[in-house]
Image (cartoon, rainbow, N blue to C red):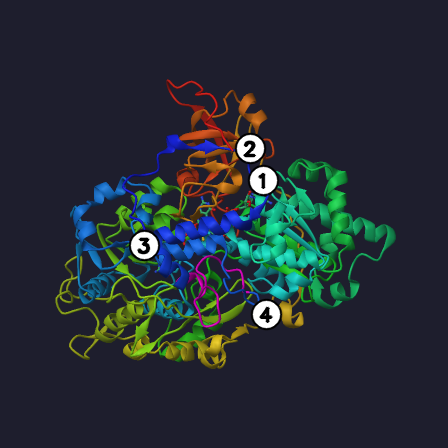
Amino acid sequence: MATKAPKSDIDETGVRVSKPKKVAVGVPAVLHALQIANEQMGVVRSVQTLARVNQKDGFDCPGCAWPEEDKRHLAEFCENGAKAVAEEATLRTVGPAFFQEHSIDELRGHDDWWLGQQGRLTHPMILDEGATHYRPVSWDDALRAVADEIAAVDDPDETVFYTSGRTSNEAAFLYQLLVRGIGTNNLPDCSNMCHESSGSALTETIGIGKGTVSIDDVHDADLLIVAGQNPGTNHPRMLSALEKAKQRGARVIAVNPLPEAGLMRFENPQTPRGVAFGGTKIADRFVQIRSGGDQALFQAIGKHLLEVEERDGGVLDHAFIDAHTSGFDAYREAMARADWASLVEATGVSEASLRVIAEDVRTSKATIVCWAMGLTQHKHSVPTLRDVVNVLLLQGNIGRKGAGVCPVRGHSNVQGDRTVGIYEKPSEAFLEALDREFAFTAPREHGFDTVEAIRAMRDGRVRVFMGMGGNFVSATPDTAVVEAAMARVNLTVQVSTKLNRSHVVTGRRAIILPTLGRTDRDRRGGAEQRVTVEDSMGAVHASRGRLAPPADDLLSEVAIVARLCGHLFDEGPSPAQAPVSHDGDPERGLPEHGELEGERHSPRPKNAPRADWAALETDYALIRSHIARVIPGFEDYDARIQKGRTFFLPNGPRDERRFATVDGKARFTANVLEYPVIPPGRLLLQTLRSHDQYNTTIYGKDDRYRGISGGRRVVLVHAEDIAELGFAEGEIVDIVSEWTGPDGTVEERRAEEFRIVPYSTPRGNAAAYYPETNVLVPLDSVADVSGTPTSKAVIVRLEHRAGAGATGAAATGD
Ligand SMILES: Nc1nc2c(c(=O)[nH]1)N[C@H]1C(S)=C(S)[C@@H](COP(=O)(O)OP(=O)(O)OC[C@H]3O[C@@H](n4cnc5c(=O)[nH]c(N)nc54)[C@H](O)[C@@H]3O)O[C@H]1N2
Ligand SMILES: Nc1nc2c(c(=O)[nH]1)N[C@H]1C(S)=C(S)[C@@H](COP(=O)(O)OP(=O)(O)OC[C@H]3O[C@@H](n4cnc5c(=O)[nH]c(N)nc54)[C@H](O)[C@@H]3O)O[C@H]1N2
Ligand SMILES: [Mo]
């Protein structure tokens, strides 16, 4: 039986701490997943649903972007994939009665867990200016209200359109067209906070912002370095691939400040061996690196390889370097100058150990480097990733079997969204193709990324904010700033499956547009529609939901966007709105390009994209034909995804060692070494995910592998730091971040009441969960080049709470 939604928030006094686990997955994981599935969906729907995850002609798991293996197991699900599915396919619903019962003030007081647990949104809702409650609204009125507010802006750049990474290729492509049709490139997305640093570094050095390996390469690798990633929790299916590689003789080096369970040992629930024999040891070597020390690690590897080459020869792939790269000499000289003392200081690893790691690389016949947020969310992430590329180039480890770069993406279609145009800095080639296809002129000026969008909202320069999925308010840094920024916007619109903070921290007016998720059946135009997604390795395939949606008249994301396009581009502002714009100037109905032309019942803006919006809404294959004509690599799109087939998008470096960089070569780069300097008495805080959450969606209160249960407000600190800083294990403290602005002033931000937990991490480093700690991340603390918030590097101090001494040890147990 499905169970009811919780009535109260997480009671943080119930936190329990036990020994962290050394093994990931196994039978307990399956049981835990089934328990959550049953709570949300009941037994029958659980079985129906979980059997279709990632099966051919089933739906793509909304959990993560790790690709499917060719031979799929009957229940190709992992614990956290199953939890992601259960959250979406839940039988709990949030409809008009719910909003009548709970005022916006009351809802704002609840935590993210409570909000998310209430269930699926079923009805379009509107919050009028000054109202205390949302009220139901018809689809047509809701969409017209959105279109009217957009049409009323003075300048199209006063609108911002966010995208999270679950949106399908079809919906994302139409959405970017809508936005460019309005006349702006303000398309921030979750990538800006996620793998943007990877995109920046890879585009510059190898000419494509994506990874260069396939799942077969992972199996065939001789050495896999997994840095800054916790696959046991965030990409559990990756563990099966690592296990397979190991069975074929590969070595794995895990680089992480924390000894994450999945990296140490893996029990595969799909094989008898996994269940009965204590699983496979994953990491041959665990490098417990100081947070932010990865650039130094890769420089050390490069330096060692070059030294051995100089002495003995036989290390480098000279043929590759000569034919395909540029900048080698400058890199070699920079590495000759790099000094071991700094490399040791930055990593916290001795020179001897650094050389042992480098020897693993030297003797490997094919090396892959995998990474995620531990490498992308630092100030110096882009140079760090350039140095990763340098090491791979030395031995020709790009564009050959078993070798390459493998940024492991987060959201299940975040890579596809970028491919089809969700980007604030679109290329000219893409815009030209878009112009041709839709007979209009897309704007050329680059738009806001996530942080720039927040600044613009904070400064009152944004009138309309729309979120295609995601939870902008909770996911972004500097929560207090973001909340105030949202309040300055005239209208905030969220297209969502589930209730979250972005529905209750709103602009002056707010609209919720509920939508179908991956698991839901999508019937349009008398036929069941498929959508398509691209995984982390550039493979595109279809996804089709089969479950009855939570409400009969829910619209898909495609339908919502297509109807908005119809309102905006075929009709112009609705008659009620047209004569008076927000500032009362009757002449100013539409943005610059929107001089009015007589057509239909009200005027149609001149420079609007042209398409048969109603037809696109009822046949997604037509959208695929548009995509096929605009984006290279999608030729015969619709035919190639039929019958569960998958196709690979072209990838120059992987397919033919072709590098679309400024000089047509893979580029070695000489980078100045950077690493965080932690002032005395301070800690470097990383904000990360527990095992029971999907970004801002909190599934439960436990972080099983790390031995934390019953609550989330914990800060993991080295035992000796706890003592040296004058605190006690189990003490409840405030975490205060210290940010020195460009003018030298120090800003402080505070997160209250966190329990100190001693944990295995390098001295000076600490960890706590996101999104609770986003209040601590300063908006201006971003990575150079990519602009990604430095969520893994926040300087903090702990503070005793007034009047509260050490409370002694937290409840412990095992
Ligand atoms: N179940 C589940 N699956 C998910 C998600 C989820 O929330 N839940 N989120 C999805 C998304 S959007 C993403 S982007 C991915 C995120 O996947 P991950 O990147 O694995 O997620 P994080 O929890 O941020 O973990 C960061 C890891 O990097 C380590 N780390 C931190 N700082 C450093 C450093 O300086 N150097 C090194 N070498 N390591 C460091 C941390 O200890 C931790 O192990 O997962 C995706 N999949
Ligand atoms: N401090 C800190 N901050 C971080 C990070 C960190 O490590 N530390 N990680 C960053 C990263 S990597 C990312 S990717 C971002 C994540 O940022 P977002 O992608 O914005 O956040 P999510 O929590 O994944 O969004 C969850 C919401 O998406 C909606 N949703 C789910 N499925 C669908 C769907 O199919 N369609 C639609 N329309 N809506 C849907 C639901 O309403 C749900 O409440 O957060 C970033 N923020
Ligand atoms: Mo992400």
Q: Is residue 11 left or right of residue 722?
A: left
Residue 618 lies within the magenta run: no
* Secondary element type, mark 1: loop
The residues tagged by marks 4 and 2 sit, at their Cα atoms, a distance apart of: 42 Å
User: Is label 4 or label 1 in front?
Assistant: 1
Q: Is residue 774 left or right of residue 287?
A: left
- Sequence order check: which comes first, mark 1 or mark 2? 1
Q: Amino acid at mark 3?
A: Lys
**Badges 1 and 3: C-beta atoms under 8 Å apart?**
no
Residue 63 lies within the magenta run: yes
Magenta residues, as a range? 49-68
- Sequence order check: which comes first, mark 3 or mark 4? 3
Q: Amino acid at mark 1?
A: Leu
The residues tagged by marks 3 and 4 sit, at their Cα atoms, a distance apart of: 35 Å
**Badges 3 and 4: C-beta atoms under 8 Å apart?**
no
Predominant secondary structure, magenta span: loop
Residue at the outermost right position = 312
The residues tagged by marks 1 and 2 sit, at their Cα atoms, a distance apart of: 8 Å
> Where does residue 547 sit, x and y in percent of width and height?
34, 66
Q: Which residue is mark 2?
A: 759
Q: Amino acid at mark 4?
A: Asn
Toward the viewer: 361 or 4? 4
Q: Residues within 10 Å of mark 4 (few under 14, many from 20)?
A: many
Toward the viewer: 356 or 154? 356
- Sequence order check: which comes first, mark 1 or mark 3? 1
Please give the label number shown on residue 258: 1
Q: Residues within 10 Å of mark 1 (few under 14, many from 20)?
A: many
Q: Is residue 529 above or below residue 314?
A: below
